[in-house]
Image (cartoon, helix red, strand yellow):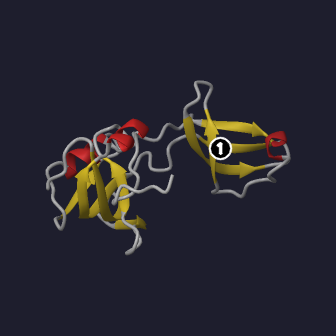
Amino acid sequence: MTIEKHHVVAVHYTLNALKENGEKSFIEKTDADNPFTFLYGVGMMLPKFEEELHGMSAGEQKSFTITAEEGYGEKQEDATVQLPVEMFEQSGMPPVGAILPLQDPEGNHVNAVVLEVSPEAVTVDLNHPMAGKTLHFDIEVVATRPATEEELAHGHAHGIDGNSGH
């Protein structure tokens, strides 16, 4: 069965950032017992990522590169914000490099990276952590199947076997 819109897809992947000189810098990989599973064709993944997987079958492998423009965009140098230290009275001050889940005024979720911590403010970078990076994927398709009506209604996969436990 090949990957089509509204399929649940499970893949193993290794993700590296490609430096300008062609060297790879490791970012992450899936655990051998826990493939990355998602609902294909509903806008959850980068369009270029889905385009590369379209029509693949279980057992097939592929390597591909996604440029910054095709991925998370170029890094915006002016996308830093100072958050008041009062925001961290309950949770404590975050360390430099921590990723903070925030919401913008429109309610969109944003992951901000802590750049600096001072007694007055916490400075964060609102760029996506992968912004400005050329991403290189080594993919192996583990399984694919049509999504259930429930998964389509919920807008996400319930695991490769269709059971989410809820």
Of 9 and 159, the residue lying toward us: 159
Rendered view: 74 above or below 99: above
62 to the left or right of 121: left
Residue 70 seen by the camera: no
Number of numbered labels in the structure image:
1
Q: Residue at x 62, y 35 (%)?
A: 103
**Residue 21's quadrant in the figure?**
bottom left
The quarter of the picture where residue 56 lies is bottom left
Looking at the picture, how far across and down is residue 66, in whole percent?
28, 50
Taking depth in this image into account, of 99 and 31 the one nearest to the observer is: 31
Relative to 65, is 105 on the left or the right? right
Q: Quadrant of residue 74?
A: top left
Mark 1 Cα-neighbour bin, 10 Å: few <14, some 14–19, many ≥20: many
Rendered location of residue 13, percent (x, y) = 32, 64
Residue 96 in sight:
yes
> Could you tell me which residue is drawn at 41 percent across and 57 percent down?
163
| Amino acid type assigned to the residue bearing label 1 in the image | Val
Please report the residue visible at 56 percent of the width from the left and 37 percent of the height from the top: 109
* Image side of residue 155 versus residue 79, left or right: left
Q: Residue at the spot x=34%, y=60% of the render?
A: 161
Mark 1 lies on residue: 124
* Residue found farthest to the bottom: 32
Residue 160, image x, y percentages: 34, 59
Q: 117 or 72: which is nearer to us?
A: 72
Q: Position of residue 157 (x, y in %)?
A: 38, 49
Say what secondary structure mark 1 lies in: strand
**Quick one: quadrant of the N terminus?**
bottom left
